[in-house]
Image (cartoon, helix red, strand yellow):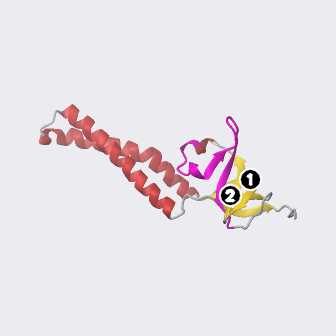
Amino acid sequence: METEKGTVQRIENGWAWVETRRNSACESCKQKSHCHVMSAGSDRMVVKAENVAHAQSGDEVEIYLNTRTKLKGLFMVYIFPVLGLLAGAVLGNNLSPHLGLNKDVGTVLLSFSGLALAFLLARILGTRMEANKELTPIVSRILRRTSAMS
């Protein structure tokens, strides 16, 4: 289970905007659209998370993203392209003579075809995960509630 702590900045239509620290995994994240960096060079960011804990502005909360989902995303971003490239190279090497192509040309063409196919498959799977809300961070619990200022 991947969790981060942060402070709710505002609430909007069932979503909480949570200020938290930015980490190195943020660069390759598929759901960057849920996060907004506070200012250039800042290590702080605001994450848009589904507010299932019913947090209020000012509350210190924990946001959650399933580790399995995160690993699936990392696999799609880093491993799929490599596997596609390698599969294309092997197929190109073996099928080039049957297709009437120079072995090197066939290997290069099918390598890039495998790479493109892997990116397409990763995009389709990522879209499906996003539609199922698997990639959406959620406010899992309130760590410290602030008093309402009314």
- Region in magenta: 27-52
Q: Nearer the viewer, residue 1 or 23?
A: 23
Which of marks 1 and 2 precedes in the sequence? 1
Say whether marks 2 and 1 touch (CB < 8 Å). Answer: yes
- Above or below, comparing residue 51 to residue 24 in the picture: below
Q: Amino acid at mark 1?
A: Gly
From the viewer's perspective, tell me whether residue 12 is left or right of residue 94: right
User: Mark 2 highlights which residue?
Assistant: 63
Q: Quadrant of residue 141?
A: bottom right
What's the residue at 23%, 40% (across, down)?
Answer: 92
Q: Quadrant of residue 145?
A: bottom right
Q: Amino acid at mark 2?
A: Ile
Q: Where is residue 61 shown, x and y percent of the image?
A: 75, 58
User: Mark 1 highlights which residue?
Assistant: 6
Category of crowding for the residue at label 1, using alpha-carbon neighbours closer than 10 angstroms: few (below 14), some (14–19), many (at least 20): many
- In whole angstroms, how far apart are the C-alphas of marks 2 and 1? 7 Å
